Amino acid sequence: MSFNELTQPAEAPVYRDAIGAERLSLGVAARLSRYLQVLTQAKKMGKETISSQELSDYTHVNSTQIRRDLSGFGKFGKRGVGYNVDSLVSQIRKILRTAGQHNIALFGAGHLGKAIASSDIFADHGFRVVAIFDNDSKKVGTQVGAHEVRHVTELNSVVEDEDIVVGVLAVPNQAAQPLADDLVDAGVKIIFNYSESLLQVPPEVTVHTSSPAVDLLYALYFYLT
Amino acid sequence: MSFNELTQPAEAPVYRDAIGAERLSLGVAARLSRYLQVLTQAKKMGKETISSQELSDYTHVNSTQIRRDLSGFGKFGKRGVGYNVDSLVSQIRKILRTAGQHNIALFGAGHLGKAIASSDIFADHGFRVVAIFDNDSKKVGTQVGAHEVRHVTELNSVVEDEDIVVGVLAVPNQAAQPLADDLVDAGVKIIFNYSESLLQVPPEVTVHTSSPAVDLLYALYFYLT
DNA sequence: TAGATTGTTAATCGATTAACAATC
DNA sequence: TAGATTGTTAATCGATTAACAATC
């Protein structure tokens, strides 16, 4: 046994690249996703390099934490310069294994559905809306963006044909649970819920409920104190 | 010095009630906000009591963590029964000091703005949209919900008259930064940004950028692995 | 009583941060 | 070179969890 072996510090958390077997911790995956959002926007604005301090200003994550998160996967930065935006985007996409395109089905052709369909907030991250559904027969057949609104009865065939991995619910509260049930039956494993309804789903399905008011309450607390 | 003093365990984190001087940690405030969202919806559905396990199912926060968070402020639950929904809602509102009404100004009378104005996702948590602005003169004067759309030039007087604490930006990317500047000038300290623009604001102003695509990336990672 | 669920302890684990040598 | 910023260490702090007595 060498002297080095005796004096080695405690092991740091094990991070492996996309080929390794280790899974990211929840916290690391969440933070990497946020870095990606800022980087994507910085790229749009023509920025070529970005420092950990700049990333920190936009994400409110401590700059040391950011350098630590990234250095676990490789030496992506240049000392005295920062990180190349383009290459950091592709590195993080590789780590998150979300470099490809993923197809979304959108439910609800009301104001919110139209806002989502016309936004590029999903498109920028490789998500493509490939179908829009509504159960109002007056809306079925109308055009929203590039898509013709379909009736929910077509759900099963569309999920299969188009390889849908995410269902986005932009519908009134009372419509949400029945649609969630349909999505589960069709085999969709990720549901993004813009209604306030508390959805009941099997454990293998992930529901993310959008909660702007909760975020506001949180911001307000720190404003008031 | 008594025997008790010698054997006391290390101090738990200090939580004080709304009258105490201590500030909640970021994590605790964020989690309490999420409990509140679920409780509010549970109340709507007519539920009278809820267990820490049920809260855990909906928030994905460990049930022990939930009991711990709550017990720091008082004994709100009944063993063998759970927590009374109504009383827990008011307790958490008291802790977060957000029991009152707070006024919002909404910017953008497009699809997203209309969706927000007609939703009760903010109203349920005590936020009231009191004014809608747009800089498109064709939209100014039209009716959105209960409000007549105003021109942005009226911003300063409205912020003062209506005691606006939050500005919500539901506008195209390129319109976001100028509006943020106007809000800062008018003295608003919390900005909720639905555009993708990275906003530059003074340190005393809080920006929260909505990022559904980031949340999806995160969910997708755990689906793919 | 029997079953359920809280409140709390104790142990562990991961996040956070300051500091600074390395180096662009 | 001088200034800036990364990569990394070491120390601390808060979050997380299992377990279980208390008690409804």
Image: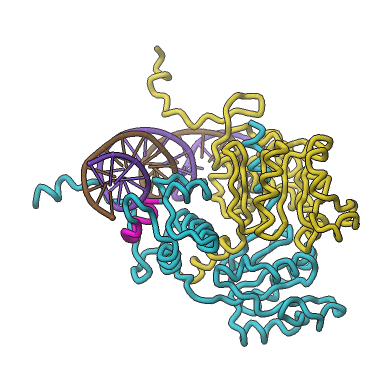
Chain colours: A cyan, B yellow, C brown, D purple
**For residue B134, which quarter of the picture?**
bottom right
Q: A71 above or below A96? A: above
Q: Position of residue A16 (x, y in %)?
A: 34, 63
Q: Residue at x 54, y 42 (%)?
A: B27
Observer-nearest of D18 and A41 = A41
Do we see residue B190 in this rendering?
yes
Q: Residue furthest top?
A: B1
Do we see residue B218 in this rendering?
no
Q: Position of residue A111 (x, y in %)?
A: 79, 66
Q: In this rendering, would A3 be left or right of A88?
A: left
Q: In this rendering, would B166 be left or right of A91?
A: right
Q: In this rendering, would B214 be left or right of A152?
A: left
Q: A141 above or below A9? A: below
Q: Count all numbered tags in the image, as a single digit.
A: 0
Observer-nearest of B151 and A10 = B151
In the rendered image, residue A59 lying in the magenta stretch gets the answer: no
Q: Which residues are magenta?
A: A67-77
Q: Position of residue A197 (x, y in %)?
A: 73, 60
Q: In this rendering, would A46 be left or right of A108?
A: left
Q: Position of residue A10 (x, y in %)?
A: 26, 47
Observer-nearest of D2 and B172 = D2
Q: B97 above or below C15? A: above
Q: Residue at x 64, y 74 (%)?
A: A184
**For residue A220, which quarter of the picture?**
top right
Quarter of the image with the N terminus of chain B is top left
Quarter of the image with the C terminus of chain B is bottom left
Q: Residue at x 61, y 32 (%)?
A: B73
